[in-house]
Image: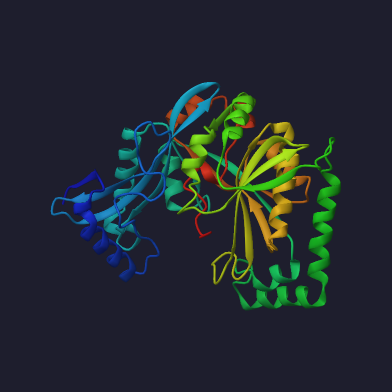
């Protein structure tokens, strides 16, 4: 039966609910939003970013899949461009191979609507969606995973990702209870701090919790937008839309000052996880977003890290790619694992980023540029 890609409307709600029920019954962990009106960054006139939902619908109204898009205004080498993040596609191919071709159809639908398309994330280079993107001649760029373990004993005992087998659990328990693991992790972070000691001081900055982004955020944006070759707009209006005072995605806004002057800001999330497939029962902190002059990244990240430490997180992490911001985490002893996430870029967007060897060095990309800090609320 022919399938059409259409915007999600209220008339589709029962069919989406039925789609989710079929997915659950088939053993899939995936589903789709049941409200056609996004809670996060709904569309309005003059918006610099918004969310929109689309469905794959058969002639009889049966929903077979869906995806979300987030158009956002970016600046690429000084020019304004509408760049779009995508989430999904979620299809019944996950439980029924007859629908395997649907993913390609949906991706082509996205590209037709928004040629400058990207996705940030993906669990590995062998995922079916990643293989499909390769065949479609997308470019795949690695994004580092920056990790700091504050409480080694709890990390060894409570994380889920490393404790998947009885043998691993036994080994990690031995490391925890003998103190060997605690000592090893502390020495590792200390050695990394020593090896990556910055040439200029990174102390002295203060992180202040603020309820919203004020005029100071516009001043910061105007002063330092030109310090980057490629980034999403991060002015006051944009950040208050992405980080509303109420509702998803929650989190904490930090204004970073040095001797009373604003030098940057960051957004953090933290949560006491329970049964998380990756983090188990750890309290996890995320540096979700950040901005300021690249030469102040060390101070901004240090003040942000210290704030998360004051919340007694077991570990903190960030997914960032600009060299100055990655170096700022290294200076604090973070373990930086390259290429742990993928920045998947459509051919049209890649043409805007070429030569990537140059532009990639000036690309500022964080979790907030994708579909947000899922799992932290």
Residue 227 drawn at (x, y percent):
64, 26
On the rendered structure, is 79 left or right of 54?
right
Residue 69 drawn at (x, y percent):
38, 43
Q: Is residue 327 visible?
A: no
Q: Is residue 170 visible?
A: yes
Q: Residue at x 77, y 73 (%)?
A: 175
Vertical arrangement, residue 347 with respect to residue 185, above or below: above
Q: Residue at x 71, y 38 (%)?
A: 297
On the rendered structure, is 23 left or right of 262?
left
In the picture as drawn, the residue positioned furthest to the top comes out as 78
On the rendered structure, is 212 left or right of 167?
left
Residue 256 drawn at (x, y percent):
69, 41
Q: Quadrant of residue 320?
A: top right
Count of numbered badges drawn on the protein: 0
Q: Nearer the viewer, residue 288 or 317?
A: 288
In the picture as drawn, the residue positioned furthest to the left comes out as 60
Vertical arrangement, residue 181 with respect to residue 285, above or below: below
Q: Residue at x 29, y 51 (%)?
A: 36
Q: Quadrant of residue 97?
A: bottom left
Q: How is the image coloured?
A: rainbow
Q: Quadrant of residue 265?
A: top right
On the rendered structure, is 230 left or right of 199?
left
Residue 11 drawn at (x, y percent):
18, 53
């Amino acid at each position: 039966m022919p399938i059409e890609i259409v915007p999600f409307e209220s008339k589709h709600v029962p069919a989406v609910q039925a789609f989710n029920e079929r997915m659950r019954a088939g053993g899939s962990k995936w589903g789709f939003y049941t409200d056609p009106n996004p809670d996060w960054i709904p569309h309005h006139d003059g918006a610099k970013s918004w969310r929109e939902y689309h469905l794959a619908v058969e002639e009889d109204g049966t929903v077979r899949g869906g995806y979300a898009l987030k158009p956002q205004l970016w600046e690429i080498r000084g020019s304004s461009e509408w760049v779009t993040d995508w989430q999904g596609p979620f299809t019944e191919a996950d439980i029924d191979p007859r629908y395997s071709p649907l993913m390609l159809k949906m991706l082509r639908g996205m590209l037709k609507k928004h040629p400058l398309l990207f996705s940030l994330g993906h669990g590995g280079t062998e995922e079916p969606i990643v293989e499909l993107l390769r065949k479609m001649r997308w470019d795949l760029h690695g994004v580092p995973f920056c990790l700091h373990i504050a409480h080694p004993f709890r990390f060894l005992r409570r994380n889920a990702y490393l404790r998947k087998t009885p043998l691993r659990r036994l080994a990690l328990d031995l490391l925890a209870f003998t103190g060997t693991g605690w000592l090893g992790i502390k020495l590792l972070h200390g050695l990394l701090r020593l090896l990556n000691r910055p040439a200029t001081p990174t102390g002295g900055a203060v992180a202040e919790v603020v309820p919203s982004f004020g005029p100071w955020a516009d001043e910061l944006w105007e002063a330092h937008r030109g310090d980057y070759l490629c980034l999403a707009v991060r002015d006051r209006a944009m950040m208050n839309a992405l980080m509303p005072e109420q509702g998803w995605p929650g989190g904490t806004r930090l204004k970073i000052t040095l001797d009373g002057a604003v030098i940057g800001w960051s957004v953090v999330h933290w949560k006491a996880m329970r049964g998380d497939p990756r983090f188990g029962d750890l309290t996890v902190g995320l540096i979700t977003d950040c901005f300021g002059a690249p030469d102040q990244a060390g101070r901004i990240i240090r003040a942000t890290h210290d704030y998360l430490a004051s919340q007694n997180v077991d570990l903190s992490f960030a997914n960032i790619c600009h060299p100055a911001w990655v170096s700022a985490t290294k200076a604090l002893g973070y373990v930086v694992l390259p290429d742990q996430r993928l920045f998947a870029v459509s051919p049209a967007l890649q043409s805007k980023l070429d030569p990537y060897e140059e532009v990639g060095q000036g690309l500022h990309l964080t979790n907030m540029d994708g579909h947000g800090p899922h799992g932290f609320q």
